[in-house]
Amino acid sequence: MLKPVFSQITVGMLAILTLGSCSNVTIDQYEATARTRYTWQVKYAYDLVDEPLPRLETFGSNSLLNRNGLKPSGRIIGPDDKGLWWPILPPRPSVDEIEQRKQSSTEKFSKPELLKSVKYKITYSSGGQRRTLPTNYQVYRQVVKTYTSGTPLELTLGVDDNSVTKAEPVGN
């Protein structure tokens, strides 16, 4: 009686492993970008302390594209402790702007919060195709360290080859 259950579990586990498998690709043409962004956000609710899902409104936002760790041109801030450059701050929303977004006279709002976010991507050529995929800080930093030397990298691709989870210099 246990054998059919065991074989079903084994088949299911194999299917999960096959679907979730990662692949590797070796590349020698690549670049990485990190889009840094500052955004002002205000929470709105009838009770800012106990409301489980306050309404969020975004106000001004500025972004900056970092490419291969090189200093971007223009008015910028940085680099920070991760080697990233940031755009200048967007204007803080005024109380008039914040009040205009209230949906009723009894709705309350929080102080504006300045949010920081970063989206990392890597672009590479392999097999005559050029691909741009989302990645993480570790992959971005590896590209920054190897970009000027042109050292080939071995990339580990994520599920369905839709992201890059790891980059290592070839031969290390």
Image (cartoon, grey):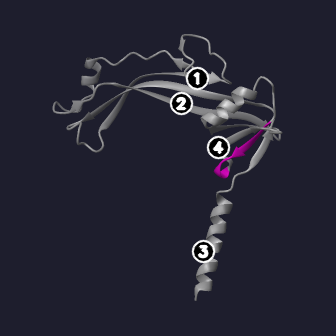
Q: Are marks 1 and 2 in contact (CB under 8 Å)?
A: yes
Q: Nearer the viewer, mark 4 or mark 3?
A: 3
Q: Earlier in the sequence, mark 2 or mark 4?
A: 2
Q: Residue at x 58, y 81 (%)?
A: 5
The residue singled out by tag 3 in the image is: 9
Residue 115 coordinates in the image, percent (x, y): 42, 28
> In the rendered image, which quarter contains the C terminus?
top right
Vertical arrangement, residue 10 with respect to residue 94, above or below: below
How far apart are the alpha carbons under marks 1 and 3?
46 Å
> In the rendered image, which quarter contains the N terminus?
bottom right
What crowding class fits label 3: few (fewer than 14 Cα within 10 Å), some (14-19), or many (20 or more)?
few
Q: Residue at x 67, y 42 (%)?
A: 164
- The amino acid at mark 3 is Ile
- The amino acid at mark 2 is Val
Q: Secondary structure at mark 4?
A: loop
The quarter of the displayed image where residue 25 is located: top right
Secondary structure predominantly adopted by residues drawn in magenta: strand
